[in-house]
Structure formats: structure tokens, C-alpha cells
Amino acid sequence: MIVAERKPFDEIKESIQDYKKVLVVGCGTCVAVCLTGGEKEVGVLSAELKLSQKAESAPAVFGEATVQRQCDFEFLDEIKDIVGEYDALLSMACGAGIQFLAERYPEIPVFPAVDTTFIGVNKDVGWYEERCRACGSCALAMTGGICPVTMCAKSLFNGPCGGTNQGSCEINKDQPCAWYMIHERLSKQGRLDNIMKICPPNDWRNQTPQTLIQPGYEERIESSK
Amino acid sequence: MNTKQQNDVETIDMATDIAVIGGGYVGLKAASQISENGYNVILAPHNDTDVNFSRLNVPSTEIDRLKALEKEVADNTNVEILPASTLVEATGVPGNFTLKFLSADTVVEKKAGAVVVASDTAVNPLNHIYGLNPAANVVSLSELENLLASEETKKEIQTGEKTVAFLVGFAHEGSPVLMKRILNSVSEIVGLDGCSAYVYVNNIKVADDGLERLYKQCRDNGAIYFKLEKAPTVKQENESLTVSFHDPVIRKDIELNPDIIVYEESLTADEANLCLAETLRIDLGPMGFLQKENVHRLPVSSNREGIFVVGSARDVQSLSKSFADVDNMVLRVKQLIGDGTKSIPAKAVVDREKCTICLTCYRCCPHGAISWDDKAIISSVACQGCGICASECPMDAIQLVDFTDDEMADRIKEAAAVTAANTPKIVAFCCQNSAYEAGLAAKAFNYELPAGLQLIKVPCAGKIDIHYILDALVEGADGVLVLACHHGNCKSESGNTYAQWRINDAYRKLAQVGIEKDRLEFATLASNMASGFARIVIDMEKRIGQKKD
């Protein structure tokens, strides 16, 4: 899932200070699962905003809405009848959702309430760890299911480097060495020969915005153009 | 909110087979009594027992009765025995547990309506603490009991006119259960003509029925107690034994040469408990026993409905107390399973449209009441209605039938709107098991209470959503109190803990929005603490009243 964290309250407050009617828009998928931007957090953030404006003579009005996913136009449509009542939108979705909300309602300023941090896993309630950088060319087949791009400080495709230190990374003793872990995993699976193969360099095309069309849907997309 | 499901009474088929884990005396007793009450039993003795059943830690006086029970259970066609088995997986809910046992290298799957855990205690000899090596004349308490149980060896002790020294309470704190066994042996020794008993003892644990009497009776019959603060020095040279110590009564150093030394043993939780707790998703209590120190769990409850812990599974217990546990457990099983159908209203419902299946509820539920298909499912039988899940759900997809978010919002609005001239408005969220009762009592006893105080009843402090706290302040409350049960006294084990965590989170949030910390307070109470309640609310009134002026 995509993991995000709430922005500092002051930053959120400052970004919307010129607006009198703000709709806080939550997203019911990834950011809800990581307890950052679902319906509960929408309620909590708007309560905080209301409290911070209590002393003001004319406090702003805060509305609340949560859609299933802000990365789908169909779900964004569900708030079309109410967005007109507001002069700013405060999105609690990931960066993709925030942009899609802004694209769907281009006439209204949209502000982010969260920082999108990584693609990660859920270790326990409220505890997430990064596992993927969305680099666009997955090496996990060769590396025993451990991502060197994410887990190695140098994102080495052919490691380890000289800084590996008895299972730890040279940058920090608490940071495991990705290539040590890869070696251990492959060794356990009897696939250690994988580590001797040269892993080709990554295709860094993903430095420009990418589009993915699933092969089975190419004709559908073509016909709708 | 899924109003359709609200107030629906679900009729549930309950499996009438009951699984008993542990094949010791208590496990057998449990199997026998459950079966007497018309339920089928799946009896799963531990895989480390040589035979089907364990005779660990059973007094020699009980062996005949135990043998009879073993035979009765083995012959009982309503008891299915899975020899030498280990529980490897447990899923499902009360009335419909699916259990997988590894029994004699095969995985056996069984359905059970309820699970009874009756693990034995482990017996640990403590000779090493005294620097003693086990020998013919240096024996553990259990070994002495065996010697005394056999007429032949008992006679040997008698004809040898043996002096027996007992080392008690220097290697560990001990317990009345052990003290009783020691005193019984002492009693037997002094009852043998020509034999005598020295008891070197630290604290004499007599907090059980008849133990004080037994202690005196041994003394009257000639046993000599040396009540010492530290262990005597014990020398074991070939066959000769020397015990030297300073006698605090006659204030002299004394050296004695007993013929036999009996060293103590400790009783500890079965090591299997650790795995059982994990597999059954029940709390591990202190010292590895399967019950938390929480008064609401007594006598035989675990944190999960339908999983009961009896005898040594939950504490070091005497046989008679363990049998009382079995009686209690049978009552609970009958209450839960009945004749196999149960009609029960849902306490919490999941809005399946909103649920994003993040598993937060599953991970937070202290009662193991939540599972999932493509959405979260709350078992009506297992759910205790604490509301921890509802307050943690990031999509507000779970509603307690009696405390919906909409009703709570109305109640908060209403409470925060009540005004009393020139006094602060205080909204107190009160757990109905403690603080709410204390609040009502404070009113009934005419304690001085703030005029602007409003109580909001919650089923458990775990239901107090951070949103409610902020909302109360938004709606105009000057102060908010979150009043929970004392630590270790929460019916839902961790409702008060969740409330405390949320308060800490709320403090961070309030600091950011510029609201003083002292407008929010967390405190714990018991239901009889009317004056404590009054003091907390009056203190808050004074504190925030000053700010108001």
C-alpha cells in the first residue's frame, strides 16, 4: 500500500488560511489503511482546524467527505454536488489522489494535508515499513524477494559494496545490509548462483511521468480515443 | 452505519463438542465432567507425556482415584482422545472453533464449540541452588513423596530411624500449595517411630485451608522448625550430610547431621503455554500462566469468550481449587453452548460498504472476536461490546449498536451545550463499569460537584474516540475528562490503555492548535470511588475556572 503521514498542523493551517470554506476530503483506500487519511482522520483534522479557529471572530467553515479512492474519477464524482459550496479542498489522499482531485475540480484550489512517504507494508497497527520505490524494473526475481533499490542505501543492483559489516550497513548499525539479507535468503533457497549473475542496470525511464496500459486493454483505450 | 443489521438477533448453531487441552488429572476431570453434562469431548493430552495421561504433580494419596478416572475417561465413548497431541492452529469463533492438532505425526482437524486449557505445571528441582547433587540421601520433595507412598521404602526409612531435613523457601518464594505437600511429608516422617524431621524454612506459607493447623500439628508431634532468614550451609561429602546455621532463637551456631536431605521444588507454568497462548490468541499472564491479573477473568475466563483456562493453566493451584475451576468451567460451557443454538443480538456491526479491511479492528480486538472474509466480521458471541474496534477503525465503519457515532455526537453536542452561570462546562466521558457508577454515587451521596458537569456514559474507555474528545471541545466544553478503570481492571483488558494512548495523542494535537493541556485529563477510578470522582471533577473545575476568570 501507499503510506502517507499527516503534515504538521501549522503547515496545513497556513496553507488554507485565506479560505473561509474548506472541504476536507479523505480517501478510503491506502491512506485509510495506514491510519492517515480515512474518514476518522478527516473528522479529527477538521475538529483540530475548528478548534484552532475558535478564537477567531469569523472562523472558517470545514466540511467533511471521504471517497472510496481519490485516484478514480468515478469516486471523485461523488462529491461533485458539494464541492461548489467550498472555496478550497484539503485532500488527505496520497500525491496521486491529491493531483487527481485537483484535475477533476481544476477551478478550486486543492491543498495536501498529508505527505506521501513510501510504498510499504503493515507491520502492526500504526507501524509501516518501506519495501518498494516503484523503480519500474523489478529485480526481485534475482534477489530472493528482497529489493536492493529500497533496502540498500546505495540502491546497488550488484552488491554488496565494501561497506557491508556483519549483516549491517555502513551507514548505521541498525540498518541491515540488503545484500547480506539477499545472500542469506538465496543461500537458504539453494539459489546462491543468482548472486554471481550480473543484474542489468535499472531502466530509469520512470524519471519522467509514466503511463501504463495493461496489454489486454490496449484496444479498449485505443478505441475510446 | 449499517442500520439494517441493528438490533437483529442472530441465531447461531453452536458446536457441542468441547476440546480439552492437557491430559493431566485436571484435564481428565474436565473431560469427565463436560461429558457428564451431555457434551462430546475431544481430549488432547500433551505430546510430551509418555502415556496418554500425565501423572505429574499428583499427590500419592490421589493416585488410586486418578487411575480410576483415567480408566473412566478412556472407556467413555463420548470422549475422543487424541494421543500425544499439540495444538498447531486455531481459527473461528466461540461455538465454531476449528482446531488442528498434530497427533502422532498426523494433523487432525476438529470442530469445537469451546476450548478448555488444562495444562499441568512444570516441576523444577532446586537442588542446584543449595549446591546439592541428587543422591540416595539427597532427594527432591516429589521423590520423598514417592518413597513415602511405597510401603517398602517407607519401612526402610522407619527402620533406619532416619532424621530428615527439609530445605524450604530459600531457593524461591514458595507457595501454600507446596507448603502443604511439604508439611504432609513432615507429618508422615514424625509419625514414624524413631524418625525425626528438621524443617529449615524461610517464610512459612500457610494461606490455605487447614495449613496453619497442619503446621502446628507437625510441631506438636515433634518436628523442629528452624525459621531462618538465609539458607543454612549444606555440605554433602560422600554419604555424610552436614547442615550448619546460626539459630536466631538460642543465638548459637549449630551443626546437625541429617540422614536425608529433602530439597524443595518450584512449580512453574507449563512451557507449552507460550505456544498455546499464541495459537489460541489468548493473553499470557504473569510467570507464563494463561490468565492476566485481572479480576474480571476470575475464575476461569481468558480474554476470549469460549476459551477457558482451568487449574494449573492459570496459576499454581491445589488440586481442590483446580477441581473448583473445573466446576466453574462446566457452568460457563453450559451457559455458552447450551443445547447447541444461541440467539444473541449483535453488539457491534460492520458497515461493509465503508470497511476497507485494513485489519486494524482484528489486530486491536482484545477478545479475538473479529475475523474477515472480504470485509471485517464481528462474532456476536465473542464480541464484548467494548468499542475499541469502533474507535480505532479509520473509516468509522464499525458502530456499536447501543453507542453509535451519531448518538454519541448528539450526546456530546447536548452535554457541551448545557450551561451553568459563570462555571466551566466539563464533559466527562465515563466507563460504565467504573467511573460512571462512581459519578452516580457521587451525585447520590451529595458530594459537591461542578454545576457545569455532564457525564457521558461509554461501554468501556476503549470506546472513547479521539474524535469525541476533540468534538466536545469544538462544541464548547471548557474541559474534558476521560475516566477509565484502573490498570489491570479493564473488562476488555486494554480499553483503558487505548484511552490513555488517545489522550496522549490528543495532547499533541491540542498543543498544535493552541489549547492548554489542562483542559483534558485522563484518570482511572473504581466504581466505589465516589469521593475520588468528586475530587477529580472539582479539581478540574477549579483549574479551568481560574482560566475563565
Image (cartoon, rainbow, N blue to C red):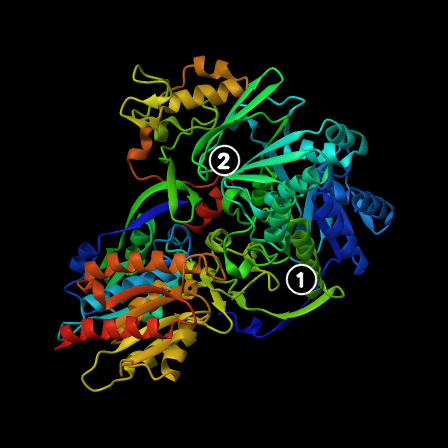
Q: Which residue appears at 40% of the width and 71% of the height?
A: B435
Tag 2: amino acid: Phe
Tell which of B418 and B305 is nearer to you. Answer: B305
Residue A125, image x, y percentages: 42, 49
In the image, residue A112 above or below residue B440: above
Q: Do marks 1 and 2 share a subunit?
A: yes
Tell which of B527 and A50 is nearer to you. Answer: B527
Q: Which residue appears at 65% of the width and 44% of the height?
A: B221
**Label 1 neighbour load within 10 Å: few <14, some 14-19, many 20+:** some
Q: Which residue appears at 76% of the width and 56% of the height?
A: B34
Foreground disc of the pair 1, 2:
2
**Label 2 neighbour load within 10 Å: few <14, some 14-19, many 20+:** many
Q: Chain of mark 2?
A: B
Left or right placement of residue A37 versus residue B5 in this view: left
Tag 1: amino acid: Arg
In the image, residue A164 above or below residue B331: above
Snapshot quadrant of residue A80:
bottom left
Residue B386, image x, y percentages: 49, 64
- Compare marks 1 and 2 and give the one earlier in the sequence: 2
Q: Is residue A130 something one can see in this rendering?
A: yes
Q: Is residue A22 something one can see in this rendering?
A: no
Left or right placement of residue B170 versus residue B474 in this view: right
In the image, residue B143 above or below residue B13: above
Q: Quadrant of the C terminus of chain B?
A: bottom left
Q: Chain of mark 1?
A: B
Q: Secondary structure at mark 2?
A: loop
Left or right placement of residue B125 versus residue A35 in this view: right
Q: Label 2, on which residue?
A: B170
Q: Label 1, on which residue?
A: B332
Q: Secondary structure at mark 1?
A: helix
Q: CA distance from mark 1 to mark 2?
A: 40 Å
